[in-house]
Amino acid sequence: MSGAALTRSLFGLFFFGVCGAQDCPLHLTTSTVVVRYGDPVSVNCTVSEDHTGIGWEASEGSGPLTNNVQFVTWSLKHLTIWDIKPQCYVNFLKNGKHNQCEQELEVIVYKTPDSISISAVNHTGPMLEGKQYQLQCEVQNIAPVQNLTVKWYKGETLEDQTTYDNLTKTPLNVSSTLLITPTSADDGAQYSCVAELELGPEGPEPHPADTSEPLTITVHCESLMPVLTASL
Ligand SMILES: *[C@@H]1O[C@H](CO)[C@@H](O)[C@H](O)[C@H]1NC(C)=O
Ligand SMILES: *[C@@H]1O[C@H](CO)[C@@H](O)[C@H](O)[C@H]1NC(C)=O
Ligand SMILES: *[C@@H]1O[C@H](CO)[C@@H](O)[C@H](O)[C@H]1NC(C)=O
Ligand SMILES: *[C@@H]1O[C@H](CO)[C@@H](O)[C@H](O)[C@H]1NC(C)=O
Ligand SMILES: *[C@@H]1O[C@H](CO)[C@@H](O)[C@H](O)[C@H]1NC(C)=O
């Protein structure tokens, strides 16, 4: 291959690889935004070339197609839509032809739970050593559950955790259960559950986390029971 041919094919590769893939002259402040339900949101879309119109299209907060500006802002005082997919689009001339392209903004709307509570299923009072019991954690009105982890703690120790694969974006009620077989050493142990939202690199730090009131268990030794019965 001659030097000139090599140069031409490298040039071609360069053009194909770099310019072919990325020819939409739009840039968003951020490609993903994480917003608490009801909070404000604002994202800029900037155009880097001459254009004949730029605008946002969304179920709320869209603006008219605008000339003579370098950027347009998608902005809401209170975001109250669970499932929204705003798009910034631009019209421009390229080699004398009209072109349009767009960039989609990913919006993750979250809500912390109204309540989180823990209880023993079908049981009240002291537990017996060696018997199995079921604890339940109920989390009300939280979103999105696909990014929720419910963590179980005994004292400070993480015992178990549950994730959810429901893709619903609106708030849901969810529960998690933990099976326990207490020993006498667990007398007075405090169980609690935490609902934690992990919303990715654009999300809030620390992760929004709500904790239940603790449930304190009382455990009676099995050997105590016959003694008690005998003394009655
Ligand atoms: C959008 O751009 C304007 C002008 O540069 C700036 O004042 C504003 O803070 C920007 N907003 C965001 C969300 O980046
Ligand atoms: C709790 O009691 C209800 C009603 O008696 C029963 O349907 C359910 O299966 C029980 N759950 C457990 C975990 O024992
Ligand atoms: C997600 O939850 C909703 C509401 O409880 C329910 O209607 C839907 O069937 C669930 N989807 C899946 C995939 O479990
Ligand atoms: C969650 O439970 C509460 C109380 O039972 C109820 O008022 C609410 O409608 C439920 N929410 C959903 C999304 O099912
Ligand atoms: C949140 O859920 C989405 C959809 O399932 C997933 O793509 C994303 O990785 C999750 N983020 C985190 C931090 O788990």
Image: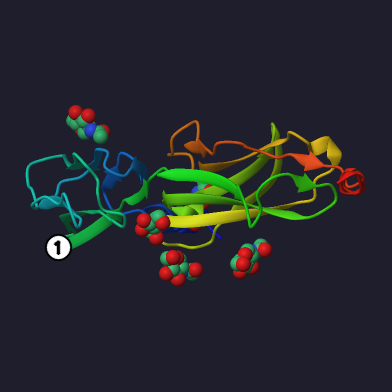
Neighbor class of circle 1 (other Cα within 10 Å; few <14, some 14-19, many 20+) is: few
Residue 180 percent across, percent down from the top left: 75, 50
* Residue on which the image places disc 1: 98
Residue occupying the far front of the picture: 232
Residue 220, can we see it? yes
Element on which disc 1 rests: strand
34 above or below 53?
A: above
Ligand number 2: quarter of image? bottom right
Q: Position of residue 150 (x, y in %)?
A: 58, 47
Residue 7 visible, this angle:
no
Name the foreground residue: 73 vs 127.
127
Q: Tell me where residue 111 sits by quadrant.
A: top left
Tell me: is circle 1 under 8 Å from ligand 1: no
Query: Is residue 23 shown left or right of residue 14?
Result: left
Nearer to me, 213 or 54: 213
Q: Hey, which quadrant is residue 82 in on the image? A: bottom left
Residue type for callout 1: His
Identify which residue, 7 or 137, lies in the foreground.
137
Residue at 52% x, 51% y is 138
Tell whether 143 sits left or right of 98: right
Q: Residue at x 74, y 39 (%)?
A: 218
User: Measured from the top left, where is residue 162 in percent x and y?
Assistant: 62, 53
* Residue 186 at x, y percent in the picture: 79, 38
What is the quadrant of the N terminus in the image? bottom right
For this view, does 72 lie left or right of residue 155?
left
Q: Residue at x 53, y 45 (%)?
A: 117
